[in-house]
Image (cartoon, grey):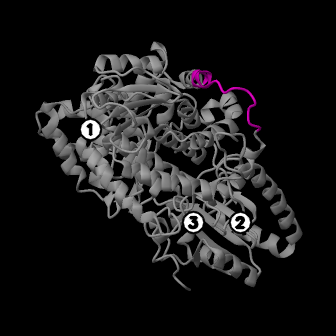
Amino acid sequence: MANRLRGAASAYLRQHADQPVDWWPWGVEPFEEARRRDVPVFLSVGYAACHWCHVMAHESFDDPEVATALNRDFVAIKVDREERPDVDAIYMAATVASTGQGGWPMSVFLLPDRRPFLAGTYFPPVDRGGSVGFPTVLRTVSDAWRQRRADVITQADEFSDAVERHVSVADRLAPTPERIDVPELRRRLRARVASLVTPAGGLGRAPLFPRPRLVLALAEGDADERARAFRVLDAMSHSGLYDHLDGGFARYCVDDEWRVPHFEKMLSDQALLAEAYSTLGRRHDVGEWRDVARSTLDFVTRRMAVTGGFASSLDADADGVEGGHVVWSPDDVATALDGRLDADAARTRWNLHGPRDIHDCWVPRLAPEAPFRTPTELLDAEEALRGRRSRRAEPGRDDKVVLEFNAMLARSLFASGDADDARCGRELLEGLAATHGGSTWWRTGDHGAPATAGDLGWYVDALISAYEVDGDDRWIDRAVVVADYLLEHHWDGVRPRADHPDVGSGVFLSADDVTDVPWRVKDVTDGSVPSSHAIAARSCARLALVTGDLDRLSVAQRLVGLLAGLAAEQPLAVPDLIEAASFAFGGVQVVVPGGPSPLSAQVRSLAVPRTVLITGSGRSPLLEGRREGWAYVCVGTRCSLPLDSVAALRQEIETAL
């Protein structure tokens, strides 16, 4: 049996390399093999940090009898969803259509022409509790393939119709013929988010996912809405969602009060949450939120730095135990703290007492009134706990450098306001240039997966943020190249222009030269990360505001217009598109010619929403004819008189917003 996964760039694929299943990576070859053998395809999709992916792997894929059935009756393909989000999106649509919900591991059975006919997520190793075991599923599918082939093909036709409806959802949403009322969209979004916030600072019902864009949107509202946003910020940073002894946020919590996390840590979450805490900490002058951002970024640079960028995730499991690296047993606590004068205070601070949370252990978390930063008198106890924890097995790390996630992190580094972070952000952007393969862009530096619209949109956005920090035209020059590639290879239809704006149907997730998928999907609703549709709109709008390119602004406005009806009816589905709309229709340009000055420093310190900073001595047309030492605030075609004081600039920005 060929070992096709051992040399894979993906840690997730390598985790399965030594199993008795004859795995294939995604590509043309396994489907040709399925046609040659006249067998269906079993597709398994997951990612390296996924706990239930590990469970199914150990229960089923490591089992020689299961492997024998898979190898005999199927061609088995393993896909890392972080490498191929386009493949994941297609078959997740089939899974949701089949089961009413999605998740990973995703288990899908396909015809040799790539069309799905049966889909699910985790299957247990035996029939139990009303769930069909994986061996039973394999036998049933194999029997149907041999004896009722026509029924299988009919089911594939039905599934294909469901997938077609999903992937073409953006095409069926008629662009609004009316003027888009962006303030009203923001108001509706805030109202919906406010209704989700619980007294404990949760966002709806369990499982609780951190949605930083929702919190940022709510924080722009009235006093009550701001208070609710601040409650969520404090709850997330004090709870079990945050790892208080090693740093970083978990993917989500399984309860209604952020107490017990699902322990995997994703680079995307660290980047988006650190930026939210930095932004709101600076905007509202809250030092504790800046501390949360600082601790999170320090965790990333300490634990996730790899050659060429930062790793995509840390595993939920350590040495086969979910959260084994995070939770504390009574014996562990006693070994670390017994005999110390500050033992009781340490147990109280980190909640290492009372009812236990999971695995008969405690998850460290802070009381709502406790300071996020450890008090001086407990630093020695903290070090004792960390020393004890350092003896445990570490979670696995997925070292692949994903363009999208790393560009998110670069933006977060620029948002912190720290000079060392800005230097790190610039170095990261230079490293990400390795994803350019000469004639194409790739999602990973090893050129193992093609870039998505999300990869390119985030990279453009991060390059604009770098320009806002230092005013160097090289960042904008690169952003223009990447944005042009995005529109050339991902745009559907005629590209909008200022004199011909109402054309085109948005961006495909995959590029036009990706030929190994049966459908090209459009990613239009936000999930754990913003949709590629939203980030394409935001990056095009911000680039247009910096360069004065009205044709590019028309692209951003078209992207918003395509989903304006959805935004009005279901704002929680597209919060990042509503933020993009704020840039596309009424973004504020703050022009500060010349080098660093108190005026440009003021713009950065305010971290105001819907604003771009145009600075330096470069080629932007908005710098032409304007004097150094002065600032100008522009909205649309109207600019303020020259401003020469920080107070006047601040007042003008507030008026423009």
The residue to which callout 2 is attached is 109
Quick one: label 1 or label 2, which is nearer the N terminus?
2
Q: Which residue is mark 1?
A: 595
Picture quarter containing residue 574?
top right
Q: Where residue 130 sits: x, y (%)? A: 69, 51
Dot 2 surroundings within 10 Å: few (below 14), some, or many (20 or more)? many
What kind of element bears circle 3? strand
Please tell me how crowded label 1 is: few (under 14), some (14-19), or many (20+) other residues with Cα within 10 Å. some
Q: Which residue is mark 3?
A: 79
Residues shaded magenta: 174-188
Distance between the alpha carbons at the discs numbered 3 and 2? 13 Å
Depth-wise, is mark 3 or mark 2 nearer the camera? Answer: 3
> Is the residue 334 above or below the residue 626 in the image?
below
Residue 311, horizontal then vertical, whole percent = 38, 58
What residue is at 27 percent from the left and 56 percent from the top?
A: 392
Identify the amino acid type marked 3. Answer: Val
Observer-nearest residue: 466 or 15?
A: 466
